[in-house]
Amino acid sequence: MNYDAQRVTHIATAKAPSMLFNNLTCNGTTVAFAHKTEVVTFSESSGTRNSSIIQETAFKPRLPVSKVIQVKWCHLSGRDYLVVGTGAGVAVYDNTCTSNLFVMELTSQNVPFPDPEASFVRGITAVPGTNYICVGSSTGHIFAFQVQEDKIELAHTLLPYEDDDGAATSALTGANQWLVTASDSGSVMIYDTTTNSTSASASSSSSASTSFQRTARFPGTCPCTSLCIVNEYVVGGYTTGQLRLFHLTTGVIFCEIGAHTRAVTALDAHPDESCFVSTGEDSVLSVWKITAPPPSTETKSTNTRQAPVITVEFTTVLPDSLLTGVVFSRNGTSNLITASYDQKKIQLFTNQ
């Protein structure tokens, strides 16, 4: 991948992204972000030939009026779903963003939300290996929805870990059968969604009788704002500006990187390469590559793992930009798309 910091396409938008972590998502055809109580979408091909937006639309989720907290494309079984989390609940749309497939209001669940005005859905991901869409909430509860084409239903409700009781869920990510969650307490947890566990206490709701098997937990001392999975590694971004690298299946912390001087605002994994991108409140954007060294004779015999090599492939500063989101384009170009608070523009870094 080859980016030029001097060649950036600025794409005008009618509305600016809200000041939220991970406030940008794309699926190969459509880019979306949250603006106050609306979801703004536009064609992912915008900016490839000129600097004007094409097919920009905005809509309010089919929920009680509330601020949109996060928008995320989820890809399951060859289909794309646009999942919208708000202060009132969660709504799921088809790939055209016009057909509302599912709605769940937080007040409809047998979960205590002490302050309805401060409740919200935050943290959205697909778990493609088991066809779940999972969303987090302000109380730390995680709702797992089983998806079968246009049929979506609540299958499980995961309770917050005892030390995180009451802590808001801040970010989710998933790959294969794995679900990874993070909270404002800083903890990161890994779940295997193929195994149900009845050991944890569960909600009395019939749709929430079991929870996934938790395979690892990493405590933290500051909020974890962002997550992504690159091959067998989980990358977590924190309000300290640090990145931490965990192994997905062994529960090992490999390294900690002082990546940004202020809070990490977004992470995204490349859809095909062993790379990820990070942005921070310091206006820095960096592309990182993870190289897993081949196992040596010693590691083969002891079943241990060598630490991967992390290198910076590209970095730049976007002056006067409070970055709220970054994604690799999903249209095969590996272009980088960024969004910034209070700026009516999207910036596109072309992969040359």
Image (cartoon, helix red, strand yellow):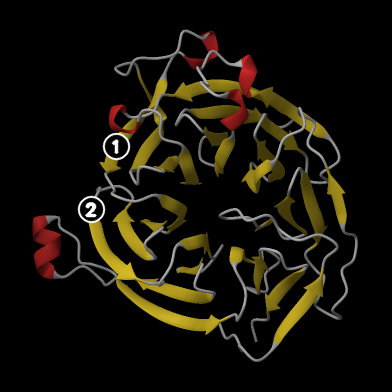
Q: Is residue 175 visible?
A: no
* Label 1 vs 2, first from the N-terminus: 1
Q: Residues within 10 Å of mark 2 (few under 14, many from 20)?
A: some
Q: Tell me: residue 70, above or below residue 271.
A: above
Residue, far right:
55
The residue carrying mark 2 is 252
Task: Give the x, y percent position of residue 53.
Answer: 87, 69
For the N terminus, which image quadrant? bottom right
Q: Say which amino acid is labelled 2.
A: Val
Q: Tag 2's secondary structure?
A: loop
Residue 194 visible in the shown view: yes
Q: Position of residue 271 (x, y in %)?
A: 56, 62
Mark 1: few/some/many CA within 10 Å (<14, 14-19, 20+): some
Instruction: Check the image and report above or below for 210 versus 135.
Output: above
Amino acid of disc 1: Thr
Left/right placement of residue 1 relative to residue 240 reads: right
Query: What residue is shown with label 1?
Result: 215
Q: Quadrant of the C terminus?
A: bottom right
Find the distance from the CA under tag 1 to the CA under tag 2.
12 Å
Task: Determine the residue positioned at 26% across, 65% down.
Answer: 255
- Judged from the image, the secondary structure of the residue bearing numbered disc 1 is strand
> Could you tell me which residue is drawn at 47 percent across and 28 percent down?
141
